[in-house]
Amino acid sequence: MAPKYHPTPLSGGDRKALKKELSNSRAMATILFARSAEVRTKGEALISEADKLLAESWNERMWADGGPIDPSPTVDQAINGGYSWLAIECSRCKTKRDVDLATLPHPPTTFVHDLASRIRCSKCAKGSRRPSATLLQLAQRPRHVPSKD
């Protein structure tokens, strides 16, 4: 974008006043830009904290009530809050494992409770027996050591 053109006034006093106003405007723009960056950083930290609290709240409701609780955080909210792993259990063989939410082929706006019908047990993948998994809770790191099949 081209800089704005300010016609130079004819009188000396007006030229000095224009120069002073342009200087003040540039200084104010620099101050506002720095303040904007500072507030954005604080805002991102607050959003991250809110996402963390949302994931912890959902975990507590899952523990107390069981079942995929609606509403749940979205995949990107869980990841932003530091809970990038989802603990699941196969409804058939009861094998527990952890799923990395960042690697799922779903949009980041997908709610975690919607994943219950989409995640299948890889151990029971023989033929048409692919039971859906039961969601346990969100985790900050993997809890279950993957078994060597």
Image (cartoon, rainbow, N blue to C red):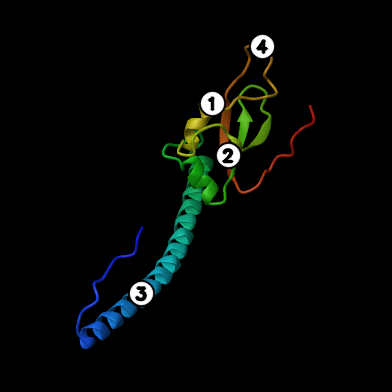
Q: Amino acid at mark 2?
A: Leu
Q: Which label number is shown at residue 26?
A: 3
Comparing labels 3 and 2, the label whose residue is closer to the camera = 3
Who's the residue at 68% across and 29% down the image? 95
Task: Tell me residue 90's x, y (percent).
Answer: 63, 27
Q: Which label number is shown at residue 16?
A: none
Q: Amino acid at mark 3?
A: Arg
Task: Compare marks 4 and 2 and give the one earlier in the sequence.
Answer: 2
From the image, tell me which residue sits under label 2: 101
Who's the residue at 74% across and 39% down the image? 145
Mark 3–mark 4 contact, CB under 8 Å? no
From the image, tell me which residue sits under label 4: 127
Q: Amino acid at mark 4?
A: Gly
Q: Amino acid at mark 1?
A: Arg
* Mark 1 nearby-residue class (10 Å; few <14, some 14–19, many ≥20): few
Task: Compare marks 1 and 4 and give the one earlier in the sequence.
Answer: 1
Task: Compare marks 3 and 1 and give the one earlier in the sequence.
Answer: 3
Mark 3 residue element: helix
Task: Compare marks 3 and 4 and give the one earlier in the sequence.
Answer: 3
Residue 60 in view: no
Mark 4 residue element: loop
Q: Nearer the viewer, residue 65 or 6?
A: 6
Task: Compare marks 1 and 2 and give the one earlier in the sequence.
Answer: 2
Q: Which label number is shown at residue 118?
A: 1
Reply above or below: 123 against 79: above
Task: Compare marks 3 and 2 and give the one earlier in the sequence.
Answer: 3
Mark 2 residue element: helix
